Amino acid sequence: TYLYLNNLERARKIGDTIVKMIAKQPDWKDASKGYPYYLRFTDDFEFITYVKPVAGVRTIYKVQGDLIRQPFFSIGYPVAFMGLCYQIFGDKKYLETAEELIEYAL
């Protein structure tokens, strides 16, 4: 939305936050933990690694990379945004982050 509205300062800030949080993913390359990719974090940039299940409520807080029927769409959105950030700002960190996410999804 910030790109669409031409608010490039905010768009870059969001892009930089995505780059930062992808780099901080603690377990997504860990087979023993099932390759979890955490989707949510606190205002202090700490990942939410567990949400207690509640009957009748579907809570999405991670992609469990070793299982099927996961919310992989939640990886596609930041990949697309990183691609746009790379096109607009020209900083390779956005392209590299997008490539890393795609590699994870494969």
Image (tube, rainbow, N blue to C red):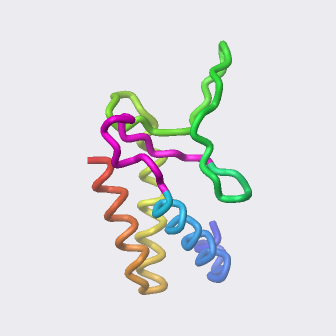
Q: Main secondary structure of the magenta part?
A: loop
Task: Kindly identify the residue that appears in the image at 60 percent across and 34 percent down.
Answer: 50
Q: Is residue 26 magenta?
A: yes
Q: Which residue in the rendered view is the most extreme toward the bottom?
A: 90
Provide residue 3's location: percent of width, then percent of height: 59, 74
Nearer-the-camera pick, 82 or 27: 27
Task: Kindly identify the residue that appears in the image at 64 percent across and 71 percent down.
Answer: 2
State which region is magenta.
25-40
Above or below: residue 60 compared with residue 24? above
* Numbered circles on residues, count: 0
Using residue 91 as the reference point, say whether residue 44 is left or right of it: right
Q: Quadrant of residue 4?
A: bottom right
Q: Is residue 72 magenta?
A: no
Q: Quadrant of residue 63?
A: top left
Task: Kindly identify the residue that appears in the image at 32 percent across and 33 percent down.
Answer: 66
Q: Which residue in the rendered view is the most extreme toward the right?
A: 43
Using residue 44 as the reference point, say whether residue 20 is left or right of it: left
Provide residue 46's location: percent of width, then percent of height: 64, 53
Task: Kindly identify the residue that appears in the image at 43 percent across and 40 percent down.
Answer: 36
Provide residue 75's location: percent of width, then percent of height: 44, 50
Q: Quadrant of residue 72?
A: top left
